[in-house]
Image (cartoon, rainbow, N blue to C red):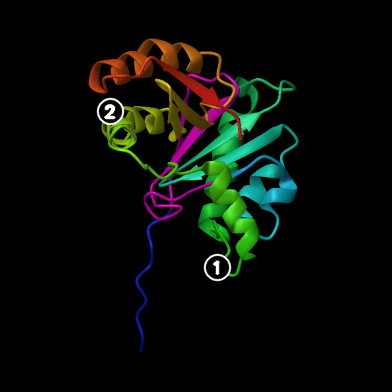
Amino acid sequence: METTTKQPPVTVYAEMTPNPATMRYVTSRMLVPDGRMVEFRTPEEAEGVSPLAAHVFNLPFVTGVFISGNFITVTRNGSVDWDLVQLELREYIQDYLNTDGRVVNSDAPAQQLADANERAVTHAEATTDDERRIIAVIDEYVSPAVAGDGGHIAFRSYKDGVVAVDLRGSCSGCPSSMVTLKGGIENLLKQMVPGVREVVAVEL
């Protein structure tokens, strides 16, 4: 007689983020492999790629889904307050992960999956020593804090002393992200990489 090891149920808890429009839901299992991210801004983008994202988009107030590691960041529109839907959404995600459980389809169309990864965006390739130093500083000092807030930051370019970065997840459209960008990240890079004058955010 075969015995199967029963997996413990997935638990989910909610965390506020600096962006009032987003909530970060942390799960007790990895949703996607470490270091991988996918982002969806419409139900159509999630269709056929991420059953979890498509499931969350079934809720009428959801306008964006960002998945990385063991968390999912959900963006809402202005029709509801988190106070009204935060617990409902947590249970909704938890129930799904304990029943269907699929996060990204193994047979997802390659182009659509690539698009979702590009929206979540990884660093642009470094071509100079300064760019490599900038990426190293972002990875070591900035990314962990940003991920803790349900977001992601990636290096895009460096020219004439100006570093361009991309902000995704809870950082995208966050009122306080510009303060963090200028007050924290810009000052850090100025100190650690001589020649950096400014940090700006770009939109994909």
Relative side of 116 to 28, left or right: right
Does residue 49 appear in this view?
no
Q: Which mark is residue 4?
A: none
User: Residue 3 appears in which quarter of the rendering?
Assistant: bottom left
Please state, as top left, top right, bottom left or bottom right, where the N terminus lies in the image. bottom left
- Of callouts 2 and 1, which one flags the residue occurring earlier in the amino acid sequence? 1
Q: Looking at the picture, tell me which residue is in the foreground, 72 or 8.
A: 72
Q: Looking at the picture, tell me which residue is in the foreground, 176 or 60.
A: 176
| Span highlighted in magenta in the image | 10-38
What's under tag 1, amino acid-wise? Ser
Query: Circle 1 — which element?
Result: loop
Q: Position of residue 69 (x, y in %)?
A: 41, 47
Outermost residue on the left side: it is 192
Q: Looking at the picture, tell me which residue is in the foreground, 53 or 194.
A: 194
At 48% across and 19% down in the image, what residue appears?
18
Q: Which mark is residue 141?
A: 2
User: Residue 59 appears in which quarter of the rendering?
Assistant: top right
Q: Position of residue 129 (x, y in %)?
A: 28, 37
Residue 95 shown in magenta: no
At 48% across and 37% down in the image, what residue appears?
25
Identify whether 151 is placed above or below 67.
Answer: above
Please state, as top left, top right, bottom left or bottom right, where the C terminus lies in the image. top right
Determine which residue is flagged by label 1: 106
What's under tag 2, amino acid-wise? Tyr
Q: Position of residue 93 (x, y in %)?
A: 56, 45
At 69% across and 34% down in the image, what residue appears?
63
User: Residue 202 appears in which quarter of the rendering?
Assistant: top right
User: What is the spatial separation of the Cα atoms under label 2 and label 1, in whole angstroms?
Assistant: 33 Å
Query: Circle 2 — which element?
Result: helix
Identify whether 80 is placed above or below 43.
Answer: above
Relative side of 14 to 116, left or right: left
